């Protein structure tokens, strides 16, 4: 396997003797004439190794995914070197399974698209290194993909959505609101000033020791919170959403996490149990933190819709709000956003849950979008680098704050 530079994001040239075996022995299916453009998408930005082949009509020819969730649950979080090693162990198999399921050979591809930003440096490096070997071996164009751009555009694979539209991207590593004006044309309205909502929910789940709960032992932190919250009473704890007096579209979740941490510590003393044991009020705390998170996301999104309409950035008649990313699969949070969308006369669209979390399909589709638009299709990959941190679009969050739009109070009957 190739060793990835941890500092500059550089990808060393692989010696010919180390080109992955399947590139030399790949079993080619009987030749088929493909009339459509075909893109192989490869995703390794965090802890999922994924690949897919998608054509220009949005048809998914084949896909495969290896999840590392079970491994990272045992360590209480993602350990980057462990994630890197698991990507290395699985990427060849995942790409080979994808191509085999698609019944194509690499030579049939129009291009190869790969996530190169943002994400975990060690994980990004594995996907980029492998992709560049394919690109050079089969002389294919390379399409570098911004992970958040791919999440934002996924809805255009599943729904007929025209530009512009508003997107809320919420996951374990990201939280932002942006106006999507084109395939690579974004206006950033607001972002998290500290951690992402998914990260906060994971930390609360770990603090509640939900991995020891019989119903939640195999679930990620966010899924465990959502599951347990269904049994809880959120009204038992009065937890206010963050930044209620800030008239902008930015987010913050660290303060909320600290409030919950103090609450859990207090309840542990009250119940006379040690840290690591399950509180009798765990479900109620889960319900309260989920509600506060949903209300925080909803209010900032409501302001973003009002701002865009005020500035004529969205059509008053057919405005669209897209919600994507791993946290978008939380149905309670979706319901809160649905209330906002209805109040603001906006259509809410969410990709199917399996396309909200990281996957190869969204990367391949982003490649199709860029290939059709002629944007960022590279034939020279010598200087390509991965970027662990990378903003999305043009930041106009200061303009949003200066507008100081007051958001009407909505009854969150959830």
Image (cartoon, rainbow, N blue to C red):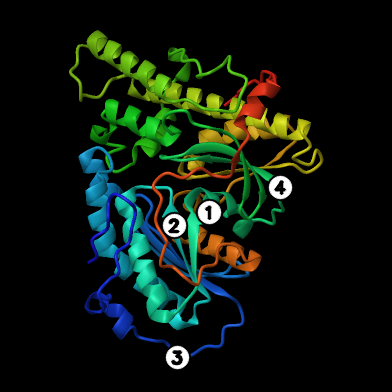
Q: How far apart are the alpha carbons under marks 3 and 2?
A: 30 Å
Q: Are marks 1 and 2 in contact (CB under 8 Å)?
A: yes
In the picture of the structure, the residue carrying the numbered disc 2 is 115
Residue 406 place in picture, x, y as percent = 69, 18
Which tag is nearer the camera, tag 4 or tag 3?
A: 4
Q: How far is mark 4 from mark 3, CA to CA?
A: 42 Å
Tag nearer the camera, 3 or 2: 2
Q: Residue at x 57, y 83 (%)?
A: 34
**Disc 2, disc 4: CB below 8 Å?**
no
Q: Which mark is residue 30?
A: 3
Residue with the most extreme bottom position: 30
**Can the viewer see residue 208 in this picture?**
no
Query: For mark 4, what is the residue?
Result: 164
Compare marks 3 and 1 and give the one earlier in the sequence.
3
Q: Give the foreground label among 3 and 1.
A: 1
- Can you give x and y, in whole percent of width and height, for residue 354 in the image? 47, 53
Percent across and percent down for residue 201 are 39, 31
Residue at the spot x=78%, y=44% of the render?
A: 318
Alpha-carbon span between mark 4 and mark 1: 16 Å
Residue at the disc numbered 1: 150
SS assignment at label 1 = helix
């Amino acid at each position: 396997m190739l060793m990835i530079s941890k500092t500059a994001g550089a990808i060393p040239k692989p010696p010919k003797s180390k080109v992955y075996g399947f590139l030399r022995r790949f079993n080619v299916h009987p030749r088929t004439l493909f009339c459509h453009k075909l893109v192989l998408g490869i995703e390794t930005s965090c802890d999922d190794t994924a690949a897919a082949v998608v054509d220009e009509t949005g048809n998914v020819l084949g896909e495969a995914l290896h999840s590392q969730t079970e491994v990272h649950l045992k360590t209480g979080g993602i350990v980057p070197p462990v994630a890197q090693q698991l990507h290395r162990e699985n990427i060849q198999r995942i790409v080979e399974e994808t191509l085999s399921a698609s019944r194509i050979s690499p030579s049939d591809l129009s291009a190869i698209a790969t996530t190169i930003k943002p994400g975990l440096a060690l994980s990004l490096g594995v996907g980029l290194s492998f992709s560049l070997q394919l690109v050079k071996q089969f002389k294919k164009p390379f399409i570098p993909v911004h992970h958040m751009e791919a999440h934002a555009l996924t809805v255009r694979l599943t729904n007929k959505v025209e530009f512009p539209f508003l997107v809320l991207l919420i996951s374990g590593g990201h939280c932002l609101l942006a106006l999507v004006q084109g395939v690579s044309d974004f206006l950033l309205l607001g972002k998290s000033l500290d951690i992402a909502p998914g990260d906060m929910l994971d930390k609360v789940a770990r603090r509640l020791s939900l991995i020891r709960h019989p119903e939640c032992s195999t679930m990620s932190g966010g899924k465990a919170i959502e599951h347990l919250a269904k049994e809880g009473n959120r009204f038992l704890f009065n937890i206010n959403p963050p930044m209620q007096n800030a008239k902008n579209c930015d987010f913050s979740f660290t303060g909320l996490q600290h409030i919950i941490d103090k609450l859990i510590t207090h309840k542990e003393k009250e119940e006379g149990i040690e840290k690591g044991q399950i509180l009798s009020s765990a479900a109620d705390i889960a319900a309260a933190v989920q509600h506060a998170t949903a209300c925080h996301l909803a209010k900032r999104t409501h302001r973003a819709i009002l701002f865009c309409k005020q500035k004529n950035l969205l059509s008053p008649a057919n405005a669209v709000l897209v919600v994507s990313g791993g946290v978008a699969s939380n149905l309670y949070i979706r319901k809160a956003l649905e209330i906002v969308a209805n109040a603001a006369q906006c259509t809410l669209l969410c990709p199917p849950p399996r396309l909200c979390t990281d996957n190869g399909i969204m990367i391949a589709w982003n490649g199709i979008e860029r290939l059709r638009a002629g944007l960022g299709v590279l034939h020279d990959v010598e200087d390509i680098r991965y970027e662990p941190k990378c903003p999305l679009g043009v930041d106009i969050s200061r303009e949003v704050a200066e507008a100081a739009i007051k958001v009407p109070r909505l009854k969150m009957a959830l």
